[in-house]
Amino acid sequence: MTAPVMDIHAILKLLPHRYPFVLVDRVLELEKGKRIKALKNVTINEPFFVGHFPHRPVMPGVLMLEAMAQAAALLSFETLGITLDDKTVYYFAGIDGARFKRPVEPGDQLIMDVTLERSKAGIYKFKGTSYVGADVACEAELMCTMRKVG
């Protein structure tokens, strides 16, 4: 495997999320202003597997969407050349067309492929598809925005 474009140390410098909510382990490819390909290693140690579901652990769909949104945020930050401060948040403005095609289980590698479709008035629209191997696990259109708080 080739060296990552961004390792976990670089990711933690950009994303405000921390354990257990950091859902991007590595960035494999990044084209500023265009697309990002990122990876989440899914392990049995994930805290959500305790209750979802004890007899058949499956990654919740909303967390697959969140993982794609975190990848989208990394793409945005790298494109704009910014690092968030304590008074800025990057969050969902909308999710359209979410579809879940395959369960994601412990041992899987979730590969998020996210493309920037457009940016207008501070709203960023992305098309995201997540894969396990060649199989589509999840897809959605994501809208995100940055806002000052406090």
Image: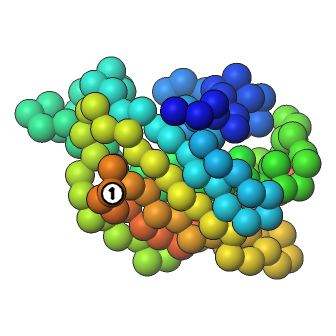
- Image coordinates of residue 57 in percent, x first then y, are 19, 36
At 43% from the left and 57% from the top, the residue drawn is 130
Mark 1 is surrounded, within 10 Å at the Cα level, by few (under 14), some (14 to 19) or many (20 or more) other residues, namely few
Image colouring: rainbow
* Residue 102 or residue 150, whichever sits in front: 102
Q: Is residue 68 left or right of residue 138?
A: right
Q: Nearer the viewer, residue 116 or 96?
A: 116
Task: Name the residue beneath numbered marker 1.
Answer: 134
Q: Is residue 85 above or below residue 113?
A: above
Q: Vertically, is 13 above or below 72? A: above
Seen from the viewer's position, the closer of residues 86 and 130 is: 130
Q: How many marks?
A: 1
Nearer-the-camera pick, 147 or 113: 113
Q: Position of residue 144 (x, y in %)?
A: 68, 63
Residue 19 seen: yes
Quarter where residue 146 is shown: bottom right
> Where 138 sits versus 54, above or below?
below
Where's residue 136, x and y in %? 34, 62
| Image quarter in which the C terminus is found | top right
Q: Residue furthest left?
A: 55
* Percent position of residue 65, x then y: 47, 56
